[in-house]
Amino acid sequence: MAQTTTAGSNRPAQPTKARPQAPRRIKESFGERLFSAANYVFFVLLGAATLFPFLNVIAKSFSGEAAVVSGIVTVYPIDFQIGTYKLVLGNSQFINSFKVTILVTVVGTLSSLLLTVLSAYPLSKPDLFARKSLLLLFVFTMLFNGGIIPTYLLMQNLGLVNTFYSLFITGLISVFNMLIVKNYFESLPESLEESAKLDGASNLRVLFSIVLPLSLPVLATIGLFYAVTLWNGYFNGMIYITDPELKPLQLYLKELVASTNDVMKMSGMIDVNSDLNQTPEAVQAASIVTATVPILCVYPFLQKYFVKGVLVGSVKG
């Protein structure tokens, strides 16, 4: 078969490649464009309304006394200063409550993740004896609970009042989170576990060596849920804790926000001998920002798992 050549040379002509055509876009009607524009405006306003209080607190924490007292601080600092943060971070009660909250968050999150996985894995197996009844018992606790007074009496009889464990032991397992993890386990291919069991692996070996490494998205997401709940929790501390050494950070902030100027001066939160006269509002704002930033720093590291973990775990079942 003869090949075509280019003019003036014996080289065969290269076949021309057809350019891929860009997909045709369906032209939006005027009503659709108007709806999209209204959506953009709505969500921009919603985002601004959500961010404004937080930006206002940050601005107050860095603003001078006169600007805070006069109420002219909005979303940017006026008469910038960092003396308020030096005062907050130098307060021994704040530092002690900060350490307590970090310890509660780490120990409580790891304990909750372990118990959640150990509960969800057996319940994800269809051949588990009385599986539906066990699931019904778990769901029952989502709708009804013992109440505050019976729970307090139980904790008192167990000798857990005014102890470190009382800050997280009552919420070790969230049934909602357990159901998400169970559904995620059910979405994994059964052939993986069957192959491992044919090679002689036990159930615990299958769980920790095969299932959990494949479940990082849902574990990271649920871990973030537990960590944020424990970090922001103050109710257990308010009910079970009277020892100042065990007071969590959020309970400390709650009492700080409710305190007056005189109380803050007596507790040392406002330095009356300093050249910089801090206002209660600025001290409260700096304390809130200092307590919020650490948990915000965790979120970017878990964001890539967040959507996948929640969606896959919540669709099936």
Image (spheres, helix red, strand yellow):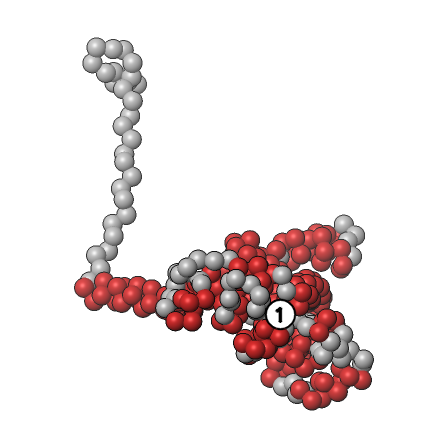
In the rendered image, residue 221, in percent from the top left (x then y), is placed at 57, 61
Q: Amino acid at mark 1?
A: Gly
> Which residue is pictured at 26% across the width and 64% down the height?
37
7 or 180, which lies in front? 180
When asked about the image quadrant of residue 136, the answer is: bottom right
Q: Quadrant of residue 45?
A: bottom left
Return the x and y of residue 41 as percentages of the image width and height: 29, 65
Few, some or many residues within 10 Å of mark 1 (<14, 14–19, 20+): some
Tell me the quarter of the image containing the N terminus.
top left
Q: Is residue 21 visible?
A: yes
In the figure, 228 relative to 18: above or below?
below
Query: Which structural element holds mark 1?
Result: loop
Q: Nearer the viewer, residue 221 or 82?
A: 82
**Relative to the observer, which residue lies in front, 180 or 46?**
46
**From the viewer's perspective, is residue 72 above or below residue 139?**
above
The reply to whether residue 173 is in sight is: no
- Horizontal side of 31 relative to 84 (left or right) equals left
Residue drawn at x 68%, y 73% is 247
- The residue depicted at 71 percent of the width and 58 percent of the height is 207
Figure check: 42 above or below 303: below
Q: How many marks?
A: 1
Measured as percent of width and height from the top left, residue 239 is found at 67, 82
Task: State the residue at coordinates (67%, 65%).
Answer: 92
- The image position of residue 61, as x and y in percent, is 48, 64
Observer-nearest of 272 and 161: 272
Quadrant where the C terminus sits is bottom right
Q: Is residue 294 left or right of residue 18?
A: right
Choose top left, top right, bottom left or bottom right for residue 73: bottom left
**Mark 1 sits on what residue?**
268
Placement of 20 over or under 176, stated as above or below: above
